[in-house]
């Protein structure tokens, strides 16, 4: 399922949310204040955040604005006791993807969370691209930032490596031509041999970084490259 961060200063509610969402198959970390939340966000990868606004140390609204500056594509579901229209508008304008007021139904929270996470995975919403290899390792490529993960391990990628990997994952099992890469890299067709040689270098680098993933980038002679499951 998804890796989530719960930021809630009410211990009973935090524990109840953790128990319910763990039972639903999600993996979780939690924070009781905004300062701890920022620390966890800086050192972990999350698919979504459940965020209370009334937090100690750093307010939930400040954390929300911080997330939008640092992690603009990260989905955030706001939980709050503030049920006024102005409060909801302020939270949504600050960058919340959804807003739920306390007290709330756990079933509604899970439904809203599921819908938010599904939307975030769509390319139109700047989500992520995912591929599971025969080794059952999940390759996830952020669709808006030069970041990718193989299982729980972050891959160190340059901007061009990330763009190339995104293209290969999007068209997994299909040939990606040199012209497709040129367009992705925003290179001019006249760049010729220089770009071709550079592409070979980037393909070699990506192959090394995916060496233990169960995935392989195959050279399709005269046509281009294809991302596929490695031969057993």
Image (tube, rainbow, N blue to C red):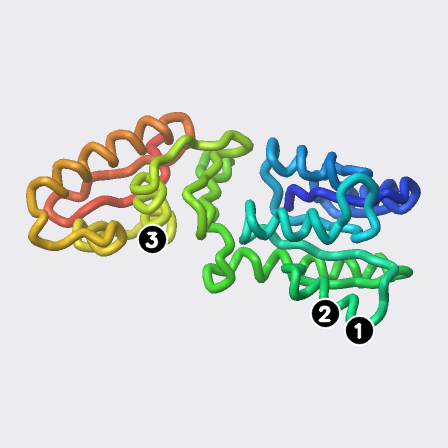
Left or right for 30, reference 94: right
Circle nearer the N terminus (3, 2): 2
Disc 2 element: helix
Q: Nearer the viewer, residue 177 or 45?
A: 45
Compute the Cα span from label 3 to label 2. Answer: 39 Å
Q: Which residue is mark 3?
A: 171
Compute the Cα span from label 1 to label 3. Answer: 44 Å
Crowding near the residue tagged with mark 2, few <14, some 14–19, many ≥20 C-alpha atoms within 10 Å: few
Is the residue under label 3 in contact with that under label 1 (CB below 8 Å)? Answer: no
Mark identifier at residue 89:
2
Disc 1 element: helix
Q: Is residue 50 visible?
A: yes
Q: Which residue is mark 1?
A: 85
Q: Nearer the viewer, residue 6 or 204?
A: 6
- Rendering quarter of residue 42: top right
Q: Give the residue furthest to the bottom.
A: 85
- Dot in front, 3 or 2: 2
Compute the Cα span from label 1 to label 2. Answer: 6 Å
- Dot in front, 1 or 3: 1
Left or right for 214, reference 11: left
Residue located at (51% from left, 62% from top): 125
Crowding near the residue tagged with mark 3, few <14, some 14–19, many ≥20 C-alpha atoms within 10 Å: some
Is the residue under label 2 in contact with that under label 1 (CB below 8 Å)? Answer: yes
């Amino acid at each position: 399922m998804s890796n989530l961060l719960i930021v809630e200063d009410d211990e009973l509610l935090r524990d109840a949310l953790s128990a319910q969402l763990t039972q639903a198959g999600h993996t979780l970390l939690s924070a009781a204040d905004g300062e701890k939340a920022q620390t966890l966000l800086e050192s972990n990868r999350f698919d979504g955040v459940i965020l209370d606004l009334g937090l100690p140390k750093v307010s939930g609204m400040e954390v929300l604005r911080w997330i939008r500056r640092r992690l603009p594509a990260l989905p955030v579901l706001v939980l709050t006791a503030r049920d006024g229209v102005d409060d909801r508008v302020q939270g949504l304008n600050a960058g919340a993807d959804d807003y739920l007021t306390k007290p709330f139904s756990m079933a509604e929270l899970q439904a809203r969370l599921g819908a938010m996470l599904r939307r975030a995975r769509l390319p139109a919403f700047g989500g992520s691209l995912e591929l599971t290899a025969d080794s059952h390792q999940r390759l996830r490529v952020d669709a808006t930032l030069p970041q990718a993960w193989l299982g729980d391990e972050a891959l160190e990628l340059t901007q061009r490596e990330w763009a190339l990997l995104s293209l290969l994952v999007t068209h997994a099992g299909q040939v990606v031509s040199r012209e497709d890469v040129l367009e992705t890299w925003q290179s001019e067709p006249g760049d010729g041999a220089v770009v071709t040689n550079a592409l070979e270098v980037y393909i070699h680098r990506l192959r090394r970084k995916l060496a233990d993933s169960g995935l392989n980038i195959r050279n399709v002679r005269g046509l281009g490259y294809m991302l596929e499951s490695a031969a057993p």
